Amino acid sequence: MNAVVRGMPVRRELPLPEGAISYLEWEADAPDKTPLHFAHANGFNGMTYQRILSGLGDAFHVRAWDARGHGATTLPADPTKHRNWYVYRDDLIQMAEDFVKASGKKIILAGHSLGGAASVMAAAARPDLVRGLVLIDPVMIPSSARYIMMVLQWLGMHSNPLADGAERRRAVFADRKTIVDRYTGRGAFRTWPREFVEDYVEGGTRIREDGQVELLCAPAWEAANFRAQRQNITQAVRNLQVPFALLYAEHGSTCRARFPILLKRRDPAAHVMQVPGSTHFLPMEFPALVIDEVRAFRDRLEREGR
């Protein structure tokens, strides 16, 4: 069942020397509410999750960015120079600094997939900004597997089906409805309700001068993210000092087997749950569960006086 949409967000920008981070904001005029930032998956955008985030507006002051190379954000994104995800960590730290300044409070970082990994790395680097983490099937690859993949890539012996598929993705369509019709019920969108696909397309496309519609996340950048795996997520987990909650998929999870255990060691009180019947796209499959998890995590922090 889909979450109830209580209010539409306002789009804002965080200006930086090399461009601007575009983000959506809900309930900015509510100083008593809990500040929450949500970071999306590779190839997506903040609007993709608006049916979840709008459902949190009664209790949370929400921001959701378009990461570098995605959505309306204008920071440089050159796939030929992309080697790791530390750039997302650093961008997210700048977002967190601005949010803390605006709210006067530490913030909760939530994220799906790439967004979850970036949130862990940002929290590990700057615990002074972060109250806690809500992680939704974050990308966590053991160092051993990462090194093997890098060596095989260097030797030309390893293909990356996710990257190869992203690179072949069609980028220009006649209109947005054509994209929604093409994606709904197919491929990565197979388990998505149509309205989530509509939100993804709304936040992730632009209308060109010729009237056609183009994806804002270039296929080459999406592919580069799948290949750029030189970040050390294991070290970030070991350095983690903030509480967290974790939901991860039953089928095709990107949170590899050892990481739920490693994370639990960092926060023995954490709620760690493999969601039955879910895939990597569990926010779209179980939006109400994600909303409940965020609320439960906030309640835990309140009980513990954090």
Image (cartoon, rainbow, N blue to C red):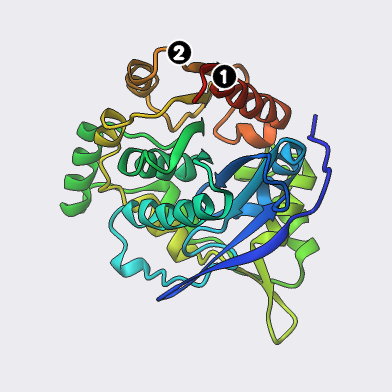
Which of the two residues, 218 or 30, is positioned nearer the viewer here? 30
Three-letter code, disc 2: Ala
Q: Residue furthest top?
A: 268
Three-letter code, disc 1: Arg
Q: Residue at x 68, y 81 (%)?
A: 208
SS at circle 2: loop
Residue topped by disc 1:
300
- Rounded to the nearest angstrom, the CA distance separating label 2 from label 1 is 9 Å
Which of the two residues, 253 or 245, is positioned nearer the viewer here? 245
Is tag 2's residue or tag 1's residue first in the polypeptide sequence?
2
Count of numbered badges drawn on the protein? 2
SS at circle 1: helix
Side of 158 where 63 appears, left or right: right
Against 172, residue 139 (above or below) is above
Tell me where residue 74 appears, x and y as whole percent: 51, 72
Label disc, if present, on residue 269 of the rendered structure? 2
Which of the two residues, 2 or 293, is positioned nearer the viewer here? 293
Tell me where residue 19 appears, x and y as whole percent: 46, 75
Side of 120 where 195 appears, left or right: right
Against 226, residue 121 (above or below) is above
Q: Would residue 243 be seen by someone viewing this image from the given angle?
A: yes
Side of 53 where 78 appears, left or right: left
Q: Pointers 2 and 1 in contact (CB under 8 A)? A: yes
Tell me where residue 108 appears, x and y as whole percent: 53, 37
Q: Residue at x 54, y 23 (%)?
A: 301
Side of 158 where 14 appears, left or right: right
Q: Would residue 137 be seen by someone viewing this image from the given angle?
A: no
Q: Residue furthest bottom?
A: 209
Tell me where residue 176 appears, x and y as whole percent: 76, 65
Quarter containing the N terminus: top right
